[in-house]
Amino acid sequence: MLEKSNLEYEKVVLIGIVTREQNEEKLEEYLDELEFLTYTAGGEVVKRFSQKMDMPNPKTFIGSGKMEEVRHFVQENEVGTAIFDDELSPAQQKNIERILNCKVLDRTNLI
């Protein structure tokens, strides 16, 4: 007989951007892969955020309005980790952690 276990998965949000080099379809493909990696690492993706930008914001990767939307969702839903689809600089990671008040990873950290 199979045993039923009550595993607690950490709540996670995924964040990516649509650029000239990466269209929405490609972003969805990357976020699907990131969601699978998150699940295998013990996380449960509760929401995906995306934003169209020419290039990532050097301070926070996404724009201030989108960051505020993510911050609000993270606080309201007790999200433990935000995972970004692209590589973050150490300064970006520090800035984002300060704003979101949760753990921040990028694709490289997760893998």
Image (cartoon, rainbow, N blue to C red):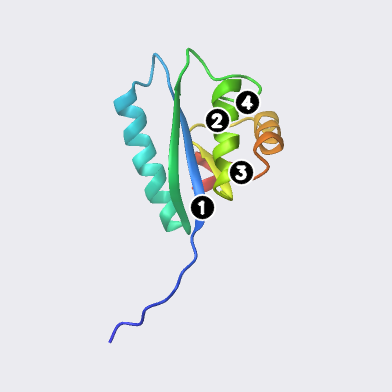
- Which tag, 2 or 3, sits closer to the chain's start? 2
In this view, the residue farthest toward the front is: 76
Disc 2 residue type (three-letter): Glu
Q: Give residue 8's position: percent from left, percent from top.
A: 49, 65
Q: Give residue 102's position: percent from left, percent from top.
A: 64, 45
The mark total stands at: 4
> Label 4: which residue?
60
Check disc 3 and report its element: helix, strand or loop.
helix
Question: Label 4: how many residues lie within 10 Å, few (<14), some (14-19) or many (20+)?
Answer: some
> Label 3: which residue?
75
Disc 1 residue type (three-letter): Lys
- Which tag, 2 or 4, sits closer to the chain's start? 4
Q: Give the alpha-carbon distance from disc 4 to disc 1, as whole Å.
A: 21 Å
Q: Nearer the viewer, mark 4 or mark 1?
A: 1
The residue at 57%/22% (across/down) is: 65
Along the viewing direction, whichever of 80 and 35 lies nearer the viewer: 80
Q: Give the alpha-carbon distance from disc 2 to disc 4, as whole Å.
A: 13 Å
- Residue 42, relative to residue 5: is it above or below? above
Q: Locate the N terminus by quadrant.
A: bottom left
